[in-house]
Amino acid sequence: MSDNKRDQDILIDFTNSLEESIGPQHGISPADFASIEQATMETHGRLQKLKESGEIGFFDLHKSDTKPFKKFASRTREKFENFVVLGIGGSALGTNAIHSALNSSFHNSLTKRKRNGYPKLLVVDNIDPDWLEELLQTVDLKKTIFNVISKSGTTAETMSQFMIVVERLKKKLKGKWKNKIVLTTDGGKGVLRELADEFNLLAFDIPNNVGGRFSVFTSVGLLPLACAGVDIDSLLKGAERMAQRCAASSIMENPAYLFGALHYLADRRKGKNISVMMPYSSKLYSVADWYRQLWAESLGKRYSLDGKECFTGQTPVKALGATDQHSQVQLYVEGPHDKITTFIEVENFSRTVTIPKLFEEKEALKYLGGKSLNQLISTEMKGTEYALTSHNRPNLTIRLPKINAHAIGQLIFMLETATAFAGGLYGINPFDQPGVEFGKQFTYAKMGREGFEKMRSELEEKTANAKRRTI
Ligand code: PA5
């Protein structure tokens, strides 16, 4: 292993989650780790089997062929002003997270030249009528390409966005509307796949063994990211590097298993049922948003693998350093002992911004002059870490040498594997989402979808008998 490779590795510093730092009541002890040795071995074996059998596909996505995405990106690059993702949840959050981390925070405000010719990227991720209408009023439809992303090909939010957009395109462009649509969906099933075939629309496949929230390294994320100018090869190289590190079966050698184990133990043995993710970087805030979905949807489960009710899951919370020091940290330091906090630290920001030596006669400002924002944000992170630790609040730090595609690839893959591993420790299936499906069924029934008549009449009966209480 070359030193250069190791220098690029992300690291987890978990000192402050241990008993030796924050005491036995809140800190994880060697005995706690020992208590999950058997479960770790079993989970490792199960994950290996899921990977080798091909039942779960996210483990191997770093091997994806990126050529088709880069080819499409080079075709759209000069041609389009806007690339709009129509999708929700796992079809949107990963793209947003990686785009926000790696492209300029003001990508969409830059001139085309400053964007290196790449289009602006907009990710819809909702069905707010005002927001969508504002978007459609703002973009020039002739210069916009819409990427409709839905694994199931039936999600009401995405399909509604799609139908609205198609109608607008047809009005404006008549028969040429098809040139402005690219679909990303399951290779063999779903209504989106049927439409692709029927209307001869360009479509990219999502492997059927990869679920929405684990899919950012498939066409779901790689296509829009390539079109927005992200180096998707380096991203996958980072994922590959982390996959090598995550091949280890022992918690102390495998960063993902360590992350999963710390959170599981903090929850189950120390009552920390909230997982705060707090990057000290605005550019990484959307990674915390993506993690929120991954952790919540994967681990929040009613039934264990043996069919018994278990009601598992930590509530993930996103926070931003230093911003939330002035909003959330009071609660984290002195409120209930129910949280484990993960900081994400950037060792080297791309830029150094120096605070000028101004107003030196003012004692309260003089100390800042000549220092950098880099020093300030790093000191503030250390301050929050210190405050939490000295109040016996477990915390850990994921340290990125810098924000680049390689580091983000590692981070994403590590958190995905950690989620799968934590699922094993909890004894639940982290790859399904019956609660989400339940909500989808409700929408289908209430909105009049065929085949949902029984559920509709049950719901109508329930609502007819329910007393609403309002003031
Ligand atoms: O992670 C998941 O499975 C979900 O969040 C889905 O991504 C989300 O519900 C959208 O589903 P689909 O891609 O089928 O439209």
Image: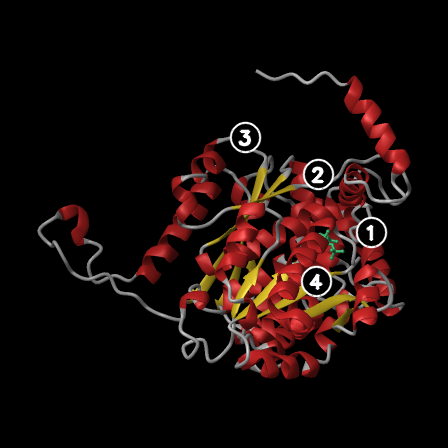
Q: Position of residue 58 (x, y in %)?
A: 76, 65
Q: Is residue 406 above or below residue 383?
A: below
Looking at the rendering, which quadrant does residue 468 occupy? top right
312 on left or right of 96:
right
Mark 4 close to ligand 1, CB under 8 Å = yes
Query: What residue is drawn where x is 62% and y is 70%?
Result: 173
Q: What residue is pinned by disc 3?
A: 336
The residue shown at (60%, 38%) is 24
Seen in the image, is 70 located left or right of residue 346? right
Report how far apart the C-alphas of labels 4 and 3 lie in the structure: 40 Å
Q: Which residue is mark 1?
A: 38
Residue holding disc 4: 149
Q: CA distance from mark 1 to mark 2?
A: 16 Å
Tell which circle, 4 or 2, labels the residue nearer the N-terminal end.
4
Which residue is labeled 2 in the image?
268
Looking at numbered disc 1 in the image, what kind of residue is underneath it?
Gln
Q: Mark 1 or 3 closer to N-term? A: 1
Circles 2 and 3: CB atoms closer than 8 Å: no
Question: Mark 4 against mark 3, which lies toward the viewer?
Answer: 4
| Amino acid type at mark 4 | Ile
Which of 214 and 167 lies nearest the eye of the viewer? 167
**Residue 441 against residue 400 in the figure, above or below:** above
Earlier in the chain: of badge 4 and badge 1, it is 1
Q: Secondary structure at mark 2?
A: helix
Check if mark 1's residue and mark 3's residue have beta carbons within 8 Å: no
